[in-house]
Amino acid sequence: QVQLVQSGAEVKRPGASVKVSCKASGYTFTSYDMNWVRQAPGQGLEWMGWMNPNSGQTDLAQRFQGRVTMTRNTSITTAYLEVSNLRSGDTAVYYCARGNWDNWFDPWGQGTLVTVSS
Amino acid sequence: IVLTQSPATLSLSPGERATLSCRASLSVSSYLAWYQQKPGQAPRLLIYDASNRAPGSPARFSGSGSGTDFTLTISSLEPEDFAVYYCQQRHNGRFTFGPGTKVDIK
């Protein structure tokens, strides 16, 4: 079955960077976009951007441009999200979510908690 | 495009009908989806393209609307339906989510 498995929780200092991985299985990795969504504690969902795993093309929400990078390694069917210059407001659960045949998000990874604290 | 959802919280009993609203600041045609999120879990796609049930979504969930006004209806609440529901729009390849409606037990 289609499955996305993310890397484990991270604790980072302000100003540091974090790289979250999302291992895909059960489908052709390069045929569907990968999205990243974050959710701050007790808050709603915030779309960060998408990546085309075939071409590597990305499109980021404006507020994340310049600080967020989305990459992939097709040989191991894994997508990555890197956030640099972390601040306390970046504390959140980060989800990867595959864009389905109609570009809606299905399925989602289990989420990765990133805590930014001094 | 900004999405607003109402009400913020809906308190109902099992077996009752739930009606959730999502309004877009500009027309999104039918490019709207609904997701369910339970505590400690990732969201799950319920409805896409405003009115199509995702595979595995129970028939008690239905979506309607187009343009700027959309509705998610749960015909008869089951215990497992108490959760937070988010709408999401797609416009020019970009996405936004609404703030969510929490459906809790009365």
Image (spheres, coloured by chain):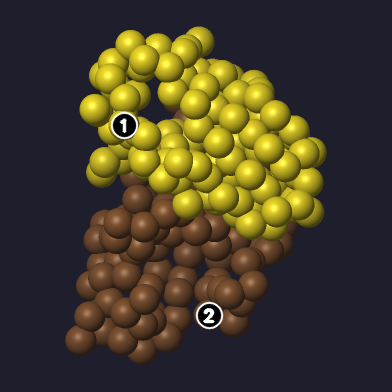
Chain colours: A brown, B yellow
Q: Residue at x 50, y 32 (%)?
A: B20
Circle 2 chain: A
For residue B92, what is the image quadrant? bottom right
Percent x, y of residue A66: 59, 82
Circle 1 chain: B
As measured in the structure, the alpha-carbon distance from the residue carrying label 1 to the one carrying label 2 is 40 Å
- Taking the image as shown, residue B33 lies to the left or right of residue B9, namely right
Tag of residue B92: none
Residue B62 in view, yes or no: yes
User: Disc 2 marks which residue?
Assistant: A67
Residue B43 sits above or below residue B61 on the image: below
For residue A56, what is the image quadrant? bottom right
Q: Amino acid at mark 1?
A: Ser
Q: Residue at x 24, y 27 (%)?
A: B106
- Taking the image as shown, residue B59 lies to the left or right of residue A118, namely right
Q: Residue at x 35, y 50 (%)?
A: A111
Percent x, y of residue A22: 43, 52
Percent x, y of residue B79: 26, 19
Residue A32 in view, yes or no: no
Instruction: Say which quadrant the C terminus of chain A sits in.
Output: bottom left
> Between residues A101 and A26, which one lies in front from this camera angle?
A101
For residue B8, what is the image quadrant? top left
> How many residues crowd around disc 1 within 10 Å: few (fewer than 14), some, or many (20 or more)?
few
Residue A88 sits above or below residue B41 on the image: below
Element on which disc 2 rests: loop
Q: Residue furthest left?
A: A118
Residue B53 sits above or below residue A26 on the image: above
Q: Residue at x 28, y 20 (%)?
A: B13
Q: Amino acid at mark 2?
A: Arg
User: Disc 1 marks which residue?
Assistant: B11
- Taking the image as shown, residue B69 lies to the left or right of residue A114, namely right
> Between residues B44 and B77, which one lies in front from this camera angle?
B77
